[in-house]
Image: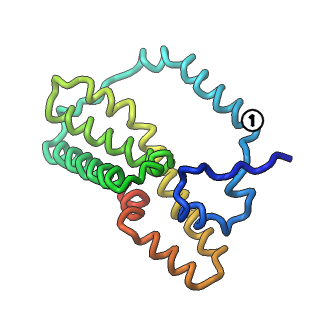
Amino acid sequence: TMSPVPPPNWLPHHIVKRFSGYPEWLRCGRWSKLSYIILILCPLYLLSTAKDAMGSYQPSRFSDSDDTITYLRLLCGLYGTIIIGIVCYLSLYWVFISYTFLTWTMCTIRFLASGIAGMCPSCWWAGYVADILKFPVLVQTIVTVGVWWMIVFPGVLYVTKIRNERIEFLKYNASFFLVNVHILVI
């Protein structure tokens, strides 16, 4: 058996404390050897099929979008940028390593890129960035919202037996930040 890996020193104490009630096997540990194999083989497979994918690539025509859609994309991108700015202002840099906030950031970049591509047809790079991020953002958004609200949220409520802790968890989920990254990311 492997010894558990302690949480990193840079992780805020209140976050470590919040998860200390969960079993050690859920919050600590090392990856299995199979995880490393999969993480090596998947990118290698993607690289080996990249030529075929690029051969059939048809760029999206964001400049053909309705102006309302273009402005909505830009507005969503600016809103996402404001949330990212708030996170940076509050020195919450550690959230950038979370899957959820990575999803938020990629979604923000995609909104901005597609909005720019719709406003400026000569900005071909923006459309290319939006196209590249389309599938990863879609998958990450579905996973973020689905896993949080269908697995994590009910699971935590189920295992939390103390009434005050359940209320705190519900308040935490109703917070401005969590509503944004777990619901508005859609």
In this view, which residue lies farthest toward the right? 1
Residue placed at 50% from the left, 77% from the top? 168
Is residue 96 visible in this depiction of the protein?
Answer: yes
Residue 72 point in image, percent of width and height: 20, 49
Foreground pick, 22 / 61: 22
The C terminus - image quarter = bottom left
In the rendered structure, the answer to whether residue 139 lies left or right of residue 177 reads: right
Q: Quadrant of residue 135?
A: top left
Foreground pick, 136 / 97: 97
Check disc 1 and report the residue beneath it. Answer: 34
Residue 142 point in image, percent of width and height: 47, 51
32 to 170, vertically: above or below: above
Foreground pick, 124 / 21: 21
Residue 122 point in image, percent of width and height: 16, 23
Name the kind of residue labelled 1 in the image.
Leu
Residue 156 point in image, percent of width and height: 61, 70
Residue placed at 71% from the left, 48% from the top? 5
Residue placed at 22% from the left, 33% from the top? 62
Residue placed at 32% from the left, 39% from the top? 110
80 to 42, vertically: above or below: below
- Total marks shown come to 1
Q: Residues within 10 Å of mark 1 (few under 14, many from 20)?
A: few
